[in-house]
Amino acid sequence: MNNKVDISVLCVLSVTVLFFLCSCSSGSRYLSIDGYAQGGTFHITYSMPAAGRKCVGALKDSVRAELLSIDNTFSGYNKGSLLIKVNNAQTTAPIEVNAMYADLFQRSYEIWKESGGAFDPTGGPLFNVWGFGFRNRENVNSLMVDSILTFVGMDKVKLDTVADNGGERYYLIKSDPRIRLNFNAIAQGYACDRLAGILDFYGVSDYLVDIGEIVCKGKNSKGSKWRVGIEKPEEGNQERGKDIQSTVDVTDCGIVTSGNYRKFYVENGKKYPHEIDPRTGYPVQHNLLSATVIACDGTTADAFSTWFMVIGLEKAQKAVADINDISAFFIYDDNGTLKTWSNVK
């Protein structure tokens, strides 16, 4: 039996997720934490129980410390991050990683396997040559793509866990030293989950965490579910939240949208979106414009939305039908007209 996330759809649906906060009076028990993270901004709205008010400062410190730890582990721009260290290690010898890296790697491996390789963090070098990674676009040819594919695949990387004085140590082993991982398609959802865990630890039962992706729990300041807007997937819509097509009410879930309408280029009359199929090495060519996924956590919603954008509308519809505990909104182009498909209850 499929247990779909219970959300209330108010209108037709569209693309990247953005939340709408209800206005609060100065006397409201709802507080907020804002700042910069993951190459953008983050915003947390939460209701601290009266008994925990004295812990507000400690909670904020914990959130910022966690974001720093996440950046130091997964950032592709922080030259001192563990991700960069592992990627730059030109060796097949074991490389020690921290528990956070091991945790996300293991979850990524599980989704890679479930997706049949459509979701694959080792596909980073493909994004680089097509100009959607950390390098400028190259003159791509089939020989280049075929060469990169020889060291793409989560089956080419192994995680070893070793007991150590009552604890555990983790080691990553690359079968090819050229393997480079990129967790961009899952790390923000994972970061939302980590911050949600901190809020849970401090006894917060009502909150919304937004780092571009969203995780929410409980109710907003008006006693209702959290209201989330979904953007219109049109080319030229570059400003987050500028063109909202509809809203949904959600709670106790992660909600993430992936789309190909912002990052793309056109060459010789052909559009190359930033979604790369790691199984073929080429940008996808289909009519699915955005995939919004609602799941029990942000990590799953983030990775699945990317998976669905890779495989396209029909295969994504089938995948959603076969998977428990997720709901999806797909926006697609039907001969120039935006249409939607949804299994949301």
Image (cartoon, rainbow, N blue to C red):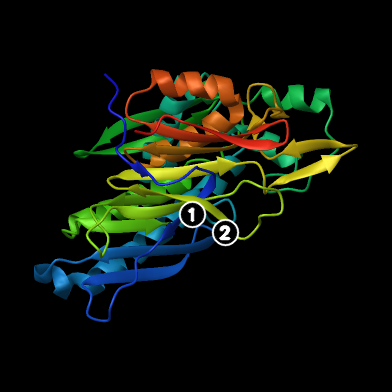
For label 2, count other residues whose C-alpha is less than 10 Å away and answer few (under 14), some (14-19) or many (20+): few
Residue 142 x/y as whole percent: 82, 23
Disc 1 to disc 2: CB gap under 8 Å: yes
Residue 230, numbered label: none
Element marked by disc 1: loop
Quarter of the figure with the N terminus: top left
Looking at the image, residue 137 sits to the left or right of residue 18; the answer is right
Relative to 152, say whether 302 is above or below: below
As shown in the figure, which amino acid type bears the numbered disc 2? Arg
Q: Position of residue 10 (x, y in %)?
A: 40, 47
Left of 334 or right of it: where is 330? Answer: left
> In the rendered image of this protein, does residue 300 appear above or below residue 46?
above
Q: Image quadrant for the C terminus? A: top left
Q: Nearer the viewer, residue 196 or 86?
A: 196
**How much space separates mark 1 and mark 2, taking CA atoms?**
9 Å
The quadrant holding residue 92 is: top right
Identified by mark 1, the residue type is Gly
Q: Residue at x 40, y 36 (%)?
A: 300
Inspect this view and state whether residue 92 appears. no
Residue underneath mark 1:
212
Report the residue that reaches farthest toward the bottom: 26
Q: Nearer the viewer, mark 1 or mark 2?
A: 2
255 w.r.t. 142: above or below = below
The residue indicated by pointer 2 is 240
Extreme-left residue of the structure = 51
Please name the residue shown 60% across and 41% down the image. Answer: 259
